[in-house]
Amino acid sequence: MRILLATDGSFQARGAEVLAEWLGYKLSAKLVVLFVRDARLIRVPELLDFGALTIPVPTYREELEKALAAKGEAILERLGKTAREVGLEVEALAETGLPHEVILRHARSADLLVLGRSGETHGASFLGLGSTADRVLRASPVPVLVAPVDYVELAGAILGYNASESAVRALHTLAALAKPLGLLVRVVSVHEDPHQAGAWAQEAETYLKDQGVRGEALVLSGDPAEHLLALQGPSDLLALGAPVRRLVLGSTAEHVLRHAVGPVLTVR
């Protein structure tokens, strides 16, 4: 298994960093750590009018590139050291480009992508979903695990299941993770018709049982996102399909991602 960790080394990314290492250790996976030197920061000097300032723009840009390169090297060295200390096979990558484009390109050769909800450009007080994470979630070719700031070891899992194509893929992905991690999966199916919700839940529960994963079903009515958020604790992995319509995440997935208290696994 190959886990891709995308990080900018910020405070907001620390939960993703440690969770990715923990998953790599538990799943005997290879950890690929990616740092992207944001090309937009390097291009800023080209777009500014320095007026009477005497600092040559080419020199300023060169110094900025060096600073970003040094930052990336320090982050990759730190994470490589901690990963190797617990016996992980680790690969470090640093590239210059638009963060979401570089992350998506490397995600094509990964089985799971792990990243934080936001990065340093949003500040430590920002509680929403950052622009890079949002773009990655809408286009990722592999499952994405969005981690909260605070690190937690997974103790359980919740699956939002409505039998859609993306929900089926989320079911299969979660089963592959829950079995080696020993997680109990609570299947949550929400529909105004209890028979329909029950059929969905039974379908998912049967699959989990056949995969050797412990599961239990909850059949509910009302708003799916509100139920999922109410059931999740900080150490619960919340998994759901994330359908994309016209480059916009489905409303349930987007609401959950922006308000979850714990890690969220989305599968397109």
Image: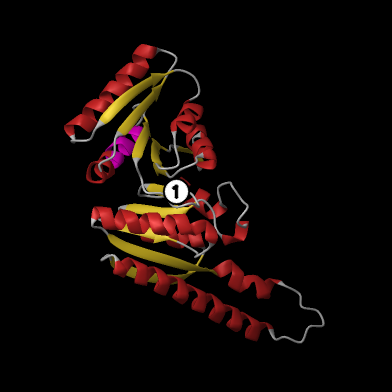
Q: Is residue 162 above or below residue 86?
A: above
- The residue depicted at 41 percent of the width and 12 percent of the height is 193
- The residue depicted at 35 percent of the width and 37 percent of the height is 157
Give the farthest residue toward the right. Answer: 52
Magenta part mainly helix, strand or loop? helix
Q: Is residue 41 above or below residue 6?
A: below
193 or 135: nearer the viewer: 193
- The residue depicted at 23 percent of the width and 46 percent of the height is 180
206 or 28: nearer the viewer: 28
The residue carrying mark 1 is: 146
Q: How many marks?
A: 1
98 horizontally vs 31: left or right = right
Is residue 168 magenta-colored? Answer: yes
Q: Is residue 110 visible?
A: no
List x then y, in percent, for residue 91: 32, 69
Q: Is residue 144 above or below residue 8?
A: above
Q: Quadrant of residue 173?
A: top left
Q: Quadrant of residue 39?
A: bottom right
Within 10 Å of disc 1 (Cα), the crowding (few <14, some 14-19, many 20+) is many
Is residue 8 magenta-colored? Answer: no
List x then y, in percent, for residue 41: 60, 69
Amino acid carrying label 1: it is Val
Q: Is residue 22 visible?
A: yes
35 or 185: nearer the viewer: 185
Q: Quadrant of the N terminus?
A: bottom left
187 horizontally vs 133: left or right = left
Please say which color scheme the image uses.
Answer: secondary structure
Residues shaded magenta: 165-174
68 or 102: nearer the viewer: 68
60 horizontally vs 243: left or right = right
- The residue depicted at 44 percent of the width and 48 percent of the height is 146
